[in-house]
């Protein structure tokens, strides 16, 4: 008699398991049953771990959901992200997760329960019934590379996007710019065809990181992606949206300056220094 066809005696316990084997089950059937049980258990365990992780995130950071929802709704109300072109995300207190806008949900009906919690290191969704924003992989790459940033905003705001389409940095022409960005806001290099074909959103993040190899993302909390549009960041979702509003105002003014004088020089370094450092860094005194 083949070992696999051997009937297992009723009442016997499976090796290492606590389940009673049904009467008359073959060895093969038992193996199948155990394999099926094990698969369910691993999945269930993962789900339970995610649920626990998410409830800890929301317990430790009770305003996170509201802050991210409000920042997304405010972004919509600024007109900087018509239709559903924009998105806002924010890290949780532990820094391991980000909460981001869902994909394709209209702003009018968007609720805190539509948001999606994603583990930054792995990109795995750990909470939420919706799909995360299609730009999720760009956000994740920026959080991984720039540990000092707390929140990220993406828009297609008109004047910043004009500079992105021209593939030109936004020059620092005055104090409005200097108050927010310490130097020109850089434009990334164009992505290659291969970078666009595969992992486009991740590569968008990588090209931004590459653009900041010799720059401090905390001193210049904005970038424009060539042929695409701007990303800004900040110490909270609210601050990151503020930076999107400031960037659009600066791009609008810079466009007009260049229209009147295409060779207009940037603001003097000492004026840039004065305005930036009176608001930022350890010697800041403005608005404190
Ligand atoms: Zn976009």
Image: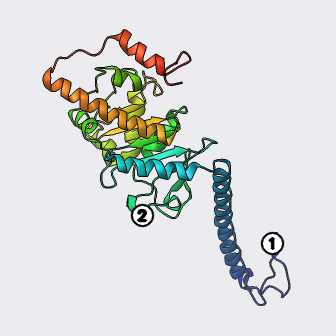
Residue 16 found in image quarter: bottom right
Label 2 CA crowd tier, 10 Å (few <14, some 14–19, many 20+): few
- Residue for point 42% across, 43% down: 138
Secondary structure, mark 1, is loop
Q: Position of residue 28 (x, y in %)?
A: 69, 80
- Element type where label 2 sits in the image: helix
Q: Position of residue 108 (x, y in %)?
A: 39, 61
Is residue 110 visible from the viewing direction of this image?
Answer: yes
Q: Residue 226: percent from the left, percent from the top?
A: 28, 36
Instruction: Determine the residue located farthest toward the bottom in the rendered image.
Output: 24
Q: Would residue 107 appear left or right of 61 to someone viewing this image?
A: left
N-terminal label among 2 and 1: 1
Taking the spot 29% from the left edge, 38% from the top edge, the residue there is: 192
Q: Is residue 89 left or right of residue 257?
A: right
The residue at the point 53 percent across, 19 percent down is: 281
Q: Quadrant of residue 162?
A: top left
Residue 105 visible, this angle = no
Up the image or down, 98 lies above or below 107; here it is above
Q: Which residue is mark 2?
A: 109
The N terminus: image quadrant: bottom right
Which numbered circle lies on residue 17? 1
Q: Is residue 14 left or right of residue 241?
A: right
Q: CA distance from mark 2 to mark 1?
A: 48 Å
Q: Nearer the viewer, residue 212 or 94?
A: 94
Q: Is residue 171 above or below residue 233?
A: above
Q: Nearer the viewer, mark 2 or mark 1?
A: 2
User: In which quadrant of the rendered view does residue 11 lie?
Assistant: bottom right
Q: How far across and down, in percent of the image, does residue 65 sit?
A: 55, 53
């Amino acid at each position: 008699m083949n070992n696999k066809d051997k009937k297992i005696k009723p009442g016997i316990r499976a090796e290492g398991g606590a389940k009673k084997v049904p009467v008359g089950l073959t060895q093969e059937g038992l193996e199948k049953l155990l394999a099926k049980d094990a698969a369910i258990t691993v999945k269930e365990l993962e789900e339970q771990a995610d649920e626990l992780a998410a409830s800890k995130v929301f317990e430790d950071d009770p305003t996170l959901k509201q802050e991210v929802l409000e920042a997304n709704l405010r972004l919509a109300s600024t007109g900087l992200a018509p239709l559903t072109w924009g998105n806002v995300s924010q890290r949780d207190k532990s820094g391991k997760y980000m909460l981001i806008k869902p994909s394709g949900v209209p702003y009018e009906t968007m609720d805190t329960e539509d948001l999606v919690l994603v583990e930054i290191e792995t990109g795995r969704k750990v909470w939420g019934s919706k799909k995360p924003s299609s730009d999720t992989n760009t956000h994740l790459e920026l959080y991984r590379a720039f540990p000092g940033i707390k929140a990220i905003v993406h828009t297609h705001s008109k004047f910043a996007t004009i500079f992105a389409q021209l593939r030109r940095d936004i020059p620092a022409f005055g104090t409005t710019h200097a108050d927010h960005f310490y130097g020109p806001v850089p434009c990334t290099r164009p992505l290659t065809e291969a970078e666009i074909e595969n992992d486009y959103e991740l590569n968008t993040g990588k090209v931004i990181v590459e653009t900041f190899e010799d720059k401090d993302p905390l001193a210049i909390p904005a970038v424009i992606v060539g042929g695409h549009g701007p990303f800004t960041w900040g110490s909270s979702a609210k601050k990151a949206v503020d930076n999107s509003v400031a960037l659009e105002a600066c791009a609008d003014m810079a466009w007009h300056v260049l229209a009147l004088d295409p060779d207009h020089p940037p603001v003097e370094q000492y004026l840039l220094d004065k305005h930036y450092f009176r608001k930022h860094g350890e010697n800041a005194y403005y608005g404190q």
